[in-house]
Amino acid sequence: MQIFNIKKIKSFPFEEREKNVFFKTREFKTRIIKLSSREQIKSCKMDSYVIFYVIEGSAKIMVDNELSEIKEGDCLISEPATLSLRTENGVKILGIQVEKQSK
């Protein structure tokens, strides 16, 4: 068992996103995603399930051409999809990627 204080985990810019992974197994990995005002994550195809929990702030998220807004306290769960994210005022998200199980 490990306990993490999500609010105290340091985050790195998107270009260094692999440094934001704080726990990883074969089945899933967890990371902090922090974007400053008007930053975005361009469209990317995810082959895994994705869970986003918004720690602070808000963002617009596109999941397979469906636009939604997520804000502090919201939890988004998506099957494998193409995702993009943009924030006007900044956002900090706990992101969890869960690998699809092979049969």
Image: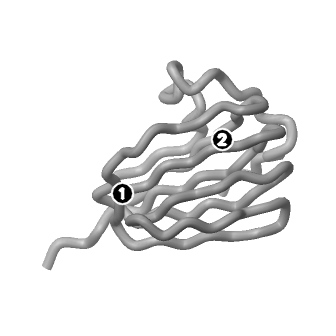
Residue holding disc 2: 32
User: On the picture, is 44 further left or further right than 69?
Assistant: left
For residue 79, above or below residue 1: below
Residue at (54%, 56%) from the top-left corner?
96
Query: The disc labelled 2 sits on which kind of residue?
Result: Ile
Above or below, 7 against 103 in this view is: above
Quarter of the figure with the C terminus:
bottom left
Q: Which residue ends up furthest to the left in the rendered image?
A: 103
Residue with the mark numbered 1: 82
Residue at 64% across, 40% down = 33
Residue located 79% across and 38% down the image? 90
Residue 4, percent across and down? 76, 47
Distance CA(mark 1)–CA(mark 2): 19 Å
> Crowding at label 2, few (<14), some or many (≥20) Cα neighbours within 10 Å?
many
In front: mark 1 or mark 2? 1
- Residue 25 x, y percent position in the rendering: 42, 50
Of residues 61 and 4, which is closer to you in this image?
A: 61
Q: Earlier in the sequence, mark 1 or mark 2?
A: 2
- Residue 88 lies in quadrant: top right
Q: Is residue 5 left or right of residue 98?
A: right
